Image (tube, helix red, strand yellow):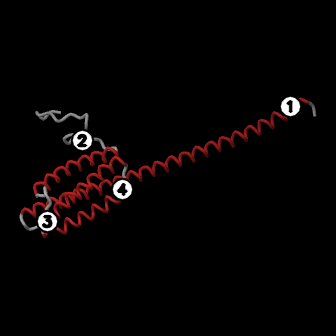
Amino acid sequence: MDVGSATALSAAVVGVVGTLLSALLTQRAADRSRQHERERAELAREGRSEIKELRACYVALNTAVRQYLAALTDQVHALSRDDPTPVRQRLAEARDQHRDVYAEAQLRVPDRVLDLAGDLSRELGAAYGMVRRLDGGVPREGDSTAAVQERIDVLWRRLREMRREMRAELGVPRVFRGRSPGTRPPASDGSA
């Protein structure tokens, strides 16, 4: 075999090996790319699932606090009428529901929301204690239906603060008077 034939054979072998390696490397790169894409898709699914679970927890917490506040308000009104019996059970159920939902929230929600929820929960407990003392006829100094109602009014405002924080955590835009920020209110003459 002469040098020219050996060189041509070597070049052919290198060309074939190069072509085969190129195809193999291209296939491996494509496989890695598909694997990365699957991993990204899985992470996105997990993220959506976590957001969905957090949203459900926020809805339950908001609902439980609202029901607890409504039951406290009803109990205060019943105390003013000297007939608290019908609403006692509803208040106890609302308190129990709140306790259960808050316990779940303690394990799921971010610290900023948990701090607000914890403060709100403690204040709800204080208002509940005041209502129960008034209902039982053993009020402490400062306990009165007016004082409880003032506390309840403050708690409604604190619930709104907590709800704003929950919405911000979920990425829900703030709404001003029924419209999103940056939108113009309708013209008073009916024109757009």
Dot 2: element: loop
Dot 3: element: loop
Q: Is residue 11 left or right of residue 170?
A: right
- Marks 3/1: CA distance? 108 Å
Q: Which disc, if any, is residue 7?
A: 1
Give the answer, above or below, for where 38 lies relative to 14: below
Point out the tag, 2 or 3, that comes first from the N-terminus: 3
- Marks 2/1: CA distance? 77 Å
Circle 3 or circle 1, nearest the eye: 3
- Marks 2/3: CA distance? 44 Å
Circle 4 or circle 3, nearest the eye: 3
Q: Which disc, if any, is residue 153?
A: none
The location of residue 127, given as percent across then percent down, is 19, 57
Residue placed under numbered mark 3 in the picture: 138
Point out the tag, 4 or 1, that comes first from the N-terminus: 1
Circle 2 or circle 1, nearest the eye: 2
Label 2, residues with CA under 10 Å away: few <14, some 14-19, many ≥20: few
The location of residue 136, given as percent across then percent down, is 14, 67
Point out the tag, 3 or 1, that comes first from the N-terminus: 1
Dot 1: element: helix
